[in-house]
Image (cartoon, grey):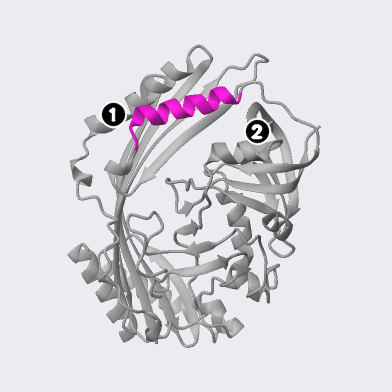
Amino acid sequence: MDKRLAELAELTVDHALKQGAREVAVGVSRARFVDLKRREGKTEKLQASTSRGLSVALYVDGRFSSNATSLLEPDALRDFVDQTLAMTRKLAPDPYRYLPDPGLYGPTTGVELDLVDPGYDALDMDERQRRVVAAEDAARREGGEPVISVTAEMVTQSSESLQIHSNGFRGEHAATSFMVGTTVTVQDADDRRPEDRHWTVARHLTDLPPAAGVGREAARRALSRMGSRKVQSGEMTMVVENRAGSRLLGALLEPLSAASLQQQRSCFEGKLGEQVASELLTVVDDPLLPRGLGSRLYDGEGLAARRMPVVERGRLRTYFIDVYYGRKLEMAPTTGGASNLVIELGDDDADGLVARAGQGILVTGFLGGNSNPATGDFSFGVRGFVINDGRVGHAVGEMNITASLTSLWKGLVAVGNDPYPYGSVRMPTLVFEGVQFSGV
């Protein structure tokens, strides 16, 4: 961690305690960001920035506030703390607001997550340009005459942070990330302009696929959207592509937060140990995956990271309980939010699952819609392809699926062996039976 930023964090903690704060939590961070975007053969955007910031959580006279500043000079920080302390003392008391028990912190070193690419600084602008040009050119060649627009982009970030609590916690986190993506728009026969994209992201540059392959995949996906139309409404088998399934998993996890439980807007309240999904579904929250996009040694409250089953053979095993709402619920904290979500894999690849489905819809994306965590009911717009006799047919769009979370997930009948590699959710292809589609 930058020595000067660490000293400013320690100064802030000391000053707040001297001015009457009972407890203090301070975080400092620095991030470097480069975004290069190319559109229609020309550089459309080139942005490079470095940001620094400090946040301070104050616990004073039974009251709490959280504040942030980018004025990182000693005198300015002292003034900032004095002003926020005065403001905090005017707030209503909250007896549940105080720092976590130090026994929950655990070690913040000793596990190598490999989140930093040591070659980050060696990536120059010429190499970034080479990659976005390769992605754009490959997309145009793959798409051919129907292509009317291609945008290729590379985004990189290097970040580091330090978190200090006045009751003994100190944790440092550093990470790099590299993203390359392409968006392609094509001209359809009826003057529509379907669009699709392909993005890849990794902690290390060497884990990214070739940029040309990213461009080709974006073009292929855009071309496949041509001729999209609705099909007849009804209950059908739904095969969900691995890169799209995280939307459904997100809806399943939303009611598991402590805030949802405490505010009585969770359909899974009191359901620990009960069957909420098919026996084929096992979901594990694993913050300790090397090079994982959600990997960490501690969460936002300083709680020690640990591997945690969420759903096991369809049975609900864990809620996401942060310290504050855990006190209100009188429940032991687990963690405030998910890290890397790993789904237990099946045996078949995507092609095999489509072939076994026979008739149905292959969903490749969700568009809009809503989910009610209190009732579990949801309605999502979908796009994808029909499946006829185990083969992928024409594109479909402007359709919706409507169900409850429990009925959907209990209808899970197959899980693929193809986890999506470019996200914090390692989602394979999923197959659901009896899903209600609204179309024609």
Closer to the observer: label 1 or label 2?
A: 2
Say which element carries label 1.
Answer: helix
Type of amino acid at the residue the image marks with label 2: Gly
Image quarter of the N terminus: bottom left
Quadrant location of the C terminus? top right
Q: Is residue 128 left or right of residue 366?
A: left
Q: Earlier in the sequence, mark 1 or mark 2?
A: 1
Q: Is residue 114 visible?
A: yes
Q: Identify which amino acid the numbered label 1 is placed on.
A: Gln
Q: Residue at x 34, y 72 (%)?
A: 26
**209 lies above or below 173:** above
Specify start and end residues of the magenta stretch as a single range: 209-225
- Position in image of residue 199 (x %, y %): 44, 38
Q: Which residue is the site of mark 1? A: 129
* Observer-nearest of 363 and 324: 363
Point out residue 208 in the picture as x, y percentages from the top left corner. Answer: 33, 40
Q: Quadrant of residue 124?
A: top left
* Placement of 274 over or under 159, stated as above or below: below
| Dot 2 crowding, Cα within 10 Å, few <14, some 14–19, many 20+ | some
Residue at 46% across, 29% down: 217
Count of numbered marks: 2
Q: Is residue 129 left or right of residue 365?
A: left
Relative to residue 430, is residue 419 drawn left or right?
A: left
